[in-house]
Amino acid sequence: MNEHVSHVLVGETNVMRTNAGFPCPDCASVFKDAKGFSRHILKQHNLKCKPIADPKSSRFTVQESPILSTSASSDSIADSFTDTDTDTFTDTNISTDTVGSSSVYSFEFPPPAANDRFIFMNMDISECFHNFQLAVKAKINQDPMSLTLEEHVQHILALSGILLLKPARTHADLHQHIDLDICDRLLDHILTSHLITRRHVFPSDIKDSVGEIVKRIVDLEPLDLPTYTEPYTRMYASREIMKLMEGVTLSQTNRILLVIRNMVECLPRHIIGDGPQEIELVTRNLQSVLVPLFEDIDAGIIFRWTSVSDDEKGITTRPDASINIVRGASLGQRLGCGEVKPQYQALNHKAIAKDLIRVGHLAKDASDKYQTRMIFGFVVVGNHGTFYVLHRTQEHLYLMCEIEHVQLPVVLGEIPLFLAQLDKVMNIVAGFAQAARREHHTYDHHPFTLADHKLLAIIDPKTSRKRKSITSHYTH
């Protein structure tokens, strides 16, 4: 490996060379050359690297890409469907003077343009969010390790231009610029007016019918047939649910009926051992729920599990799940992504926060790369799922809006709880449908995305279960 290696691919994470050298995305170590970096990645993280040399010069000029992606799909640009190794997006129109330093202290947050403001309830949200970004930067400058993953998810996402909106779950620091009532009203406004993901209702007659079917299989009621009088079987229940389907299209109602049918067929009657770990949670529980909600292969939309493991991921090479456009054998642009944690991690607020930040960054990078206004995202922790849409609102503002938070069954007896939330599930499906429309924005320049090594430089490395997580749902 020679001296003019400009960056190294670790899986699909693009690690750029900085003034100090090559930063490890996981442990904050920095190595002066690509050889030492690659040796560290192989020995400490059991991953292989691919050094990329600068073909234009035998000497390397230190320059960071303004947008560093931790993204993970081998997606292609727009609809060209050409192979690519990473979702890293580089804006060649930005001067190297503004991105020359690898330090988080060099971050610049330009004020929103006068003709590109988001006004809500007579409040300039663009200006208020910009002031919040400056306050976060001042907080970091005053105390470089003052942020924690557990408590400051909104602060960290703000460094990448993302305003996270969750019902009644926004940080007090943000309320100094946008108060809680405005945050909640803004969230409802975006979901209702822009994304049309509110007030969807599952048909009550179908809900009552499927509820009776589920009750019979859960209670093991006898099946009174001329040739069979044993307990109600899963196969018979599955057939009865399919009779409730309307038409031959993947409507919102039909998608949810497919989910319920899959649950009836796949879920055990009792939790086995300590409950499913990540791989089993994905292959048995989530596969049966999420694929029917979002996948439509005939329409070129595929739901893929891309990086699932029972071990905690160190370097974030790709998301656990990715929803992509596909044409033939070629994988195209990303419509959504998600992260999964087993139930025993539910109170590990640091790990959950890291997943939420990762989903936000990956969604932003996909929006930047493909010029799409909306990207879908989700975080599942055990038997609870939280679903989001990231919306490119202004040049320097992305709104990451929580659509719904729902409980997902892990045993057969919990399906009635899922049936009670079907209106919420309808909202989730509607939110993804909006993202799948692939509406484009016209912004050519994009805020940088906070890279992993810069994130490690500004957060407290210690972990404490006593820290309160503002953005977490404590029903996990």
Image (tube, helix red, strand yellow):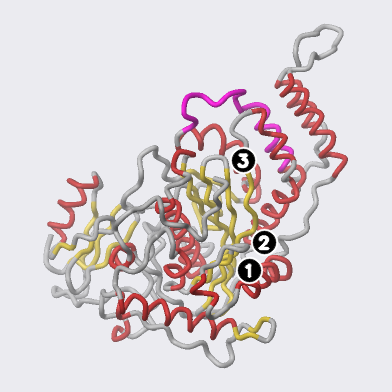
Give the foreground label among 1 and 2. 2
Query: Residue 434 got which mark?
Result: 2
Q: Residue at point 49% right, 32% down?
A: 276
Residue 318 in view: yes
Which residue is denoted by mark 3 in the rendering?
Answer: 408
Inspect the magenta stretch and tell me whether residue 271 lies in it: yes
Callout 1 environment at 10 Å: few (<14), some (14 to 19), or many (20+)? few
Nearer to us in this view, 220 or 313: 220
Q: Residue furthest front?
A: 466
Q: Position of residue 462 (x, y in %)?
A: 30, 56
Q: Position of residue 12 (x, y in %)?
A: 35, 55
Q: Position of residue 132 (x, y in %)?
A: 48, 79
Of mark 1 and mark 2, the one earlier in the sequence is 2
Q: Amino acid at mark 3?
A: Leu
Magenta segment: 256-276
Which residue is denoted by mark 1 in the rendering?
Answer: 439
Nearer to us in this view, 171 or 454: 171
Q: Residue at point 49% right, 82% down?
A: 130
Of mark 3 and mark 2, the one earlier in the sequence is 3
Q: Residue at point 60% right, 60% down?
A: 402
> Where's the C terminus, which quadrant?
top right
Calculate the distance from the C-alpha at mark 1 to the C-alpha at mark 3.
Answer: 30 Å
> Measured along the vertical axis of the image, is residue 204 above or below residue 450?
above
Label 3 residue SS: loop
Q: Amino acid at mark 1?
A: Glu
Q: Residue furthest bottom?
A: 114
Calculate the distance from the C-alpha at mark 3 to the C-alpha at mark 2.
Answer: 23 Å
Give the foreground label among 3 and 2. 3
Give the foreground label among 1 and 3. 3
> Measured along the vertical axis of the image, is residue 143 above or below residue 309?
below
Quadrant of residue 31 within the rendered picture: bottom left
Label 1 residue SS: loop
